[in-house]
Amino acid sequence: MWMRLIATTCAFFCWKQGDLNSPPREFRMKVHLFGAASSPGCANFGMKHLAKENGDLYPKGSQFIMRDFYVDDGLTSAGSTEEAVQLAREARELCAMGGLRLHKFVSNERES
């Protein structure tokens, strides 16, 4: 005997014209719901999966995502402005490969 558990599936049932004696139709969400209890874990998994799969193309961006992110917030430092710009570029390009838009970078460097 086996059991399959899908914790993040969101489904609902609908009865035609509200008749509970008729068979229900099942509808499933095709996207993950924002605010669901599992959302932070799913976001973290997705980001880290992208980083692992594309680490050879974007080593600095991958390392940043793997080590310095929690859900959708990343915090790190770099030794120079050029290194920080490269890290941000790699992380953005890496995320774009998964259809994610990484944005809202902030720096304490006056020239950046």
Image: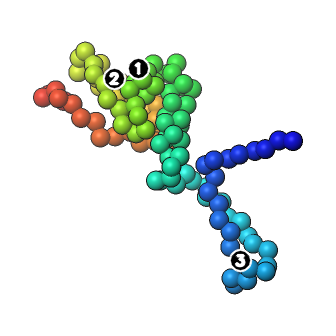
Secondary structure of the residue carrying numbered label 3 = loop
Q: Locate residue 9 relative to residue 20 in the image: left or right.
A: left
Quadrant containing the C terminus is top left
Q: Position of residue 81 (x, y in %)?
A: 23, 21
Which of pointers 3 and 1 lies earlier in the amino acid sequence?
A: 3
Which of pointers 3 and 2 lies earlier in the amino acid sequence?
A: 3
Instruction: Report the residue marked by disc 1.
Output: 60
Q: Residue at x 79, y 79 (%)?
A: 22
Quadrant containing the N terminus is top right
From mark 1 to mark 2, how far is it between C-alphas? Answer: 8 Å
User: Which-is-in-front pick, marks 3 and 2?
Assistant: 3
Instruction: Report the residue marked by disc 3.
Output: 15
Q: Position of residue 33 (x, y in %)?
A: 52, 54
Q: Amino acid at mark 2?
A: Gln
Q: Residue at x 43, y 28 (%)?
A: 65
Q: Residue at x 53, y 35 (%)?
A: 45
Secondary structure of the residue carrying numbered label 1 = helix
Instruction: Report the residue marked by disc 2.
Output: 86
Q: Amino acid at mark 1?
A: Lys
- The reply to whether dot 3 and dot 2 touch (C-beta < 8 Å) is no
Q: Which mark is residue 25?
A: none
Q: Position of residue 57 (x, y in %)?
A: 50, 21
Q: Locate residue 31 relative to residue 93 in the image: left or right.
A: right
Q: Residues within 10 Å of mark 1 (few under 14, many from 20)?
A: many
Q: Amino acid at mark 3?
A: Trp
Secondary structure of the residue carrying numbered label 2 = helix
